Amino acid sequence: MVKKRTCVFISGRGSNLHNLILHSRNNSFPVRINLVICNNSNAYGINFAKKHKIPYVFINTKIKNFENKILFHLKEHKISFICLAGYMKIISDTFIKNFRGKIINIHPSLLPKFKGLNTFSRMLKNKEKVAGCTVHYVNKKLDDGKIIIKKNFLINDKDDELSLKNKTQKLEYKAFPEAIIKIFRNT
Ligand code: GRF
């Protein structure tokens, strides 16, 4: 199987990046992580790229034309698939047009509920009974594209923001690889 050349975009801890790197070592996993793009020079996640000798690039997303710089690196590394894993920047429509149907994101709620930030505090405030995560295609609206996979769990009385986050992330480590396998299963 020819693995898809993939880039993971991160801004922080990078635990999903790490999980994807570990999965990609499996011969039957459809993608290889060939590049990491990071827009935060303090992001812990970059250590996973270093440890696994994966090329990485820091991009200052405060400067003009930063997406052109990203596109340059993606081209240079012949990237054909993009995973957003905690990348805290909205992707422009122009950028999406370059990779239509080839960008996916993981979000810590059961979309379409709780788009955007601070999902766990809003869930608790709303007295939600179920939480979870969603992997979806990226379109020009925030956390809005076609859903690939959702995974959920029941919220209990003792749950707080931290426990919800931990439980959600555990599910994310299953959902992200499963979504990728699902996407490429018939290719
Ligand atoms: C994840 O919870 C993901 O759902 C959200 O950002 C978080 C990233 O975590 N989009 P990590 O950096 O992969 O640890």
Image (cartoon, rainbow, N blue to C red):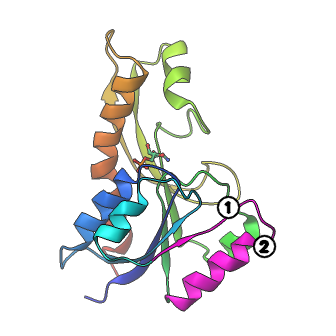
| Residue bearing mark 1 | 91
For residue 118, above or below residue 66: above
Residue 172 drawn at (x, y percent)? 34, 47
Question: Residue 132 location in percent, x, y?
Answer: 39, 35
Residue 147 versus residue 41: which sits nearer the camera? 41
25 over 41 or under it: above or below? below
Numbered disc 1: secondary structure: loop
Q: Quadrant of the N terminus?
A: bottom left
**Residue 59 tag number:** none
Badge 2 crowding class, 10 Å Cα cut-off, few under 14, some 14 to 19, many 20 or more, is few
Residue 148 position within the rendered picture, expressed as x and y whole percent measured from the top left: 43, 56
Give the residue displayed 30% in from the left and 73% down from the top. Answer: 185
The earlier-in-sequence mark between 1 and 2 is 2
Q: Is residue 80 something that shows in the picture?
A: yes
The reply to whether callout 1 and callout 2 are in contact (CB within 8 Å) is no
Query: In the image, is 96 to the left or to the right of 83?
Result: right
Quadrant for the C terminus in the image: bottom left
Mark carried by residue 65? 2
